[in-house]
Image: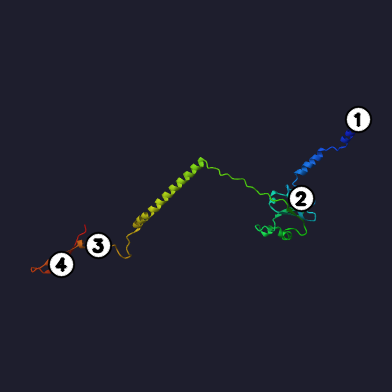
Amino acid sequence: MSDTLKEENKEVQSKPEISSDMLDLDIVEDNKLVKKLDHETLSLNGAAYKIVEEYREAIDFEMIEARYTDFLEKYDYIVGDISYDKLRLRGFYYSKNKKVPIDMRISSLKDYLTEYCSFGCAYFVLERLEPKKKQTSPSKRKSKPTQNKKNTQNKKQKNLRKFDQAKKREEKSKPENKKLNNVQNKKSFTKIGRKPQENIDKKTTSQTEENKVKTVKNQKGETKFKIRQRNKPE
């Protein structure tokens, strides 16, 4: 029995102790966004990507993790190019996707590298293996309007009705006002060099009153002469 106990104690002592540093490393690796699954696949934020192309050892986990955003999850491909020690990431869709512009399809990769990337820069191409997550928008429940909102709406409707009624009254009264204004605006006018008829009549009557004529007759009744007598001014 003693020999068996001694052998068990030796086995326990021979087992390596798991240090706290090893545990910390495991936890840190689990929290990383970018992980290498094998020599052909990567894991970005939990999604698997296939390394389609890598030129001049462009894949740097630290740089990818620093530049990666959730916005890239909607794309089928992720292309990264390095210039002046800075990584730039851009997303592309499948070539069969006709709903997107041509420059957003992976078939235009060569044009992108020649036009927008520096000559001979290091780059890589990753293809998403897992299907894209459908972004489910939260269901919006129609909130019932409160009593205060209803009261304010009713007040607005009443005010609008009053305004419309007042407008209709104004439109009805406009033609009558126009007629009155036209009558008032009609002025008695005379041509230049002519005097009003009423003034002429007054002057003629006044002249007849002023110039009184006396006729002198003979015995036979024949008129001998006429005497015009003017009225003396008062």
Q: Position of residue 34 (x, y in %)?
A: 75, 48
Which element carries disc 3, helix, strand or loop?
A: helix
Instruction: Give the label, 1 or 3, closer to the camera.
Output: 1
According to the image, what is the colour scheme of the structure? rainbow
What kind of residue is marked 2?
Leu
Q: 137 and 110: which one is in front?
A: 137
For label 2, the residue is 42
In primary-sequence order, the first of circles 4 and 3 is 3
Q: Position of residue 54 (x, y in %)?
A: 78, 55
Q: CA distance from mark 1 to mark 4?
A: 188 Å
Question: How would you rate the neighbour count of disc 2 (Cα within 10 Å): few for under 14, some for 14-19, many for 20 or more?
Answer: many
For label 3, the residue is 201
Which element carries disc 2, helix, strand or loop?
A: strand
Instruction: Give the label, 4 or 3, closer to the camera.
Output: 3
In primary-sequence order, the first of circles 2 and 4 is 2
For label 1, the residue is 2
In the rendered view, would you say 214 is above or below 82? below
Q: Residue at x 69, y 49 (%)?
A: 70
Which element carries disc 1, helix, strand or loop?
A: helix
Q: Residue at x 71, y 60 (%)?
A: 107
Q: Are marks 3 and 2 in contact (CB under 8 Å)?
A: no
In primary-sequence order, the first of circles 1 and 3 is 1
For label 4, the residue is 226
Determine the image quadrant of residue 213. Answer: bottom left
Question: How would you rate the neighbour count of disc 3 (Cα within 10 Å): few for under 14, some for 14-19, many for 20 or more?
Answer: few
What kind of residue is marked 3?
Asp
In primary-sequence order, the first of circles 3 and 2 is 2
Q: Which label is found at residue 65?
A: none
Q: CA distance from mark 1 to mark 3?
A: 164 Å
Q: Position of residue 212 (x, y in %)?
A: 18, 63
Q: CA distance from mark 4 to mark 3?
A: 25 Å
